[in-house]
Image: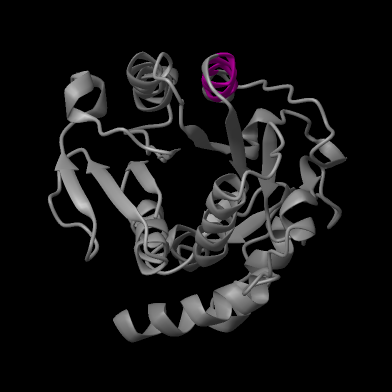
Amino acid sequence: MAKILIAGCGDLGSGVATELVAQGHRVTGIRRTKSDFPAGVEGITGDLVDMSDDMLPDVDVVFLIMTPNGRTESAYRTAYFDTAQTLIRRYQSVATPPKVFFISSTSVYGQSQGEWIDEATLAQPTSATAKVLLETEQSLAAAFSSVSVRCSGIYGSGRYRLLETVLSESDWGANSWTNRIHRDDVVAALVLLANCALSEKQLPAHVIVTDQTPVSMWEVKLWLATSLGVKVAVNGGEGFAPTSGKRLQGQYLLSQGWLLQYPSYVTGYSELLREFKTLR
């Protein structure tokens, strides 16, 4: 039985916690405001950056899974960099520091001319928020044996933003490459990484979590528009070929036996559409 801390026990964190509790591990979860936690999880409610060292238990593995309150540089710094400093202060000097998994984003790859990106590609963030993410990754890596888990666009149950955008029939704008990963496949990836760490496997400094199926945004929106029975909102004179974005592939998780439940947007959004239509 390992001791695991999930700092950010929201949707993703709760999914990971549930799986790890089922495996027999002792799991502590932190939520900033809410007090509902999965069965078997020892819950702590409060802002991580305000917590004293004695509030955080000794653990073998830490997951840092934060959600910013906005898409500004300051919101990202508060959510990611500042919380990472609390973990560094608490765990850096213990006799056996925990393995730390920081759930980051593939936005740290600022390349946007249709390049193929994999785990050997150098991160070159261009936006202020992506630069904060990379700074957080580097800060944790300097203090611990850490892994940056770089996820592409997460979708899944309850995440309707793209569907609502298509329903609004607002102009789609220029086409671009998009990369996606279902929430349940992210949970499976994180549980696999925890088990790799606990079995003392050598882990890379970062991994990419994506469904391995980059597609054009217009393709996704066209499929959704057809499924929802709304108009195709392409009003400009651009060609169909994507003019920006990147194409992501990640090999490490596959090499460790990770199996995708949703290997493309079609399988994932088919289920999401059924859920969405029951609410309309």
Residue 253: x and y, percent? 71, 54
**Dominant secondary structure of the magenta stretch?**
helix
Magenta segment: 132-142
User: Which residue is found at the position 72% from the left and 65% from the top?
Assistant: 257
User: Which residue is found at the position 53% from the left and 22% from the top?
Assistant: 144
Res. 14 in view: yes
Work out whether 113 lies above or below 21: above
Residue 254 horizontal side relative to residue 265, left or right: right
Foreground residue, 170 or 270?
270
Q: What colour scheme governs how the chains and residues are painted in the rendered image of this protein?
A: one colour
Res. 10 in view: no
Foreground residue, 81 or 193?
193
Residue 118: x and y, percent? 82, 42
Foreground residue, 147 or 243?
147
Residue 253 horizontal side relative to residue 41, left or right: right
Quadrant of the image containing the N terminus: bottom left
Quadrant of the image containing the C terminus: bottom left
Foreground residue, 216 or 148?
148
Residue 219 horizontal side relative to residue 227, left or right: right
Whether residue 47 appears in magenta in the rendering, the answer is no
Residue 220: x and y, percent? 67, 66
Work out whether 228 lies above or below 178: below
User: Which residue is found at the position 37% from the left and 39% from the top?
Assistant: 67
Place residue 243 in its image quadrant: top right
User: Which residue is found at the position 62% from the left and 40% from the top?
Assistant: 150
* Mark count: 0
Residue 205: x and y, percent? 68, 31
